[in-house]
Each structure stands twice: as C-alpha cells, then as structure tokens.
Amino acid sequence: MKADQKKQCDYILDRLRKGQERAEILQQFSKVFKNDTTRTFDNRLKIARAQFDSESERIKQEAEKGIEKDIEALKSKIMAPVERQVILADSIRDFEDKLAGRKPFTFFQGQKIVNSHNGGVFMLPIDTQTSVKKVIRELIAELNKMGGDYAATKSEVKLDAPMAFIVKTTDTELAKDAEDFK
C-alpha cells in the first residue's frame, strides 16, 4: 500500500473509531482529499472497515480475558461452604472449651475486664455463661442451616367449626348411627 493510500485509510479508520457513518466520513474525506472519487473512497473504506473490525475483535477478546481473570481472582477469595462450616465448627469448639474452663479468656463484668481464671481457679458468672451458651446455640443453628437441617417449626391448627368423626366397624352399627342423626 502506498503512503497516500495508507494516509487515506488511516483517516477513514480514525473516523470509524469515532463512530461516524459512511455518509459523514465521505463528506469529510472529499473535503480533505479533493481529487479522489467515490469509488476510491469505497475501496479505502473497505480496507479501513476490515482493520476496524479486526481491532474491535482483538479488543473484545482482551476484555473477555481480563474479565475471566477478574472472575477467577474473585472466586479464589470466596470461601467454599465446607470452609465456612469448618470455621463455624472451630468457633463452637472454642466457645465450648471456654465455657468448660479448659481455655482462659477475658470478659466484661460491669465496667471492668475480668479474667476467667484467677489463680488457676475457673470463675465465670452465670449471666456470662448464659450468653456464651446462646452464642453456641446460634452457631450450631447456623451450621445446621448450612448443612440443610432446620429447626422444627411450630404449627398451630385452628378449627372454625367443631368437627365430628365417626368410626364404626360393622354395617349394622353404621345403620343405627344413621338413624340417630335423622
């Protein structure tokens, strides 16, 4: 391709990148390149469109690769359900060890921070024990939900009108009861 042809193709390619249409580009092209015909323009436009399409495809592929890399990076940061279950199970064990006195810890008692073990003796107020037990129950409930187990739901049946059930074993008894209801 000659230098002037390349210059014309680059001019058209620049306009295509800006999103201009054929008629608009032709008008500007004929002002800049006065001696060239519409046929010349269409030939240069064909070459420029091929370049533009290949550039667009390459950019699209690179963008898709970048998106795939981002997705993989995000996936690596998300914990699998099994990992979350292990963390919850470890937390439950940790709280149970603290509640049983096997593991020393600190807690608030009023305005003071108090140690659970004082001279090797385990001391934990009832209200703190109750709150630790509540946390353990909540963690177990969450672990059960993750495993597909749910706590039993309470259901209440309300009847608007009284209902009577008659259960008889012989036909003669049924006939007697039918006469009684007449």
Image (cartoon, rainbow, N blue to C red):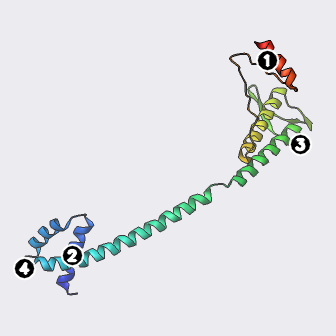
x and y percent of residue 75 in the render?
59, 59
Where disc 1 sits, the SS reads helix
Residue, disc 3: 102
Mark 2 packing: few (<14 Cα in 10 Å), some, or many (20+)? many
Q: Amino acid at mark 3?
A: Arg
* C-alpha separation, residue under disc 3 versus residue under disc 2: 81 Å
* C-alpha separation, residue under disc 2 versus residue under disc 1: 97 Å
Where disc 4 sits, the SS reads loop
Q: Nearer the viewer, mark 1 or mark 3?
A: 1
Q: Nearer the viewer, mark 2 or mark 1?
A: 1
N-terminal of the two: label 2 or label 1? 2
N-terminal of the two: label 3 or label 4? 4
Q: Along the horizontal axis of the image, is 57 left or right of 45? A: right
Q: Is residue 151 above or below residue 27?
A: above
What residue is drawn where x is 74% and y is 18%? 163
Q: Is residue 41 above or below residue 106?
A: below
Residue, disc 1: 178
N-terminal of the two: label 4 or label 1? 4
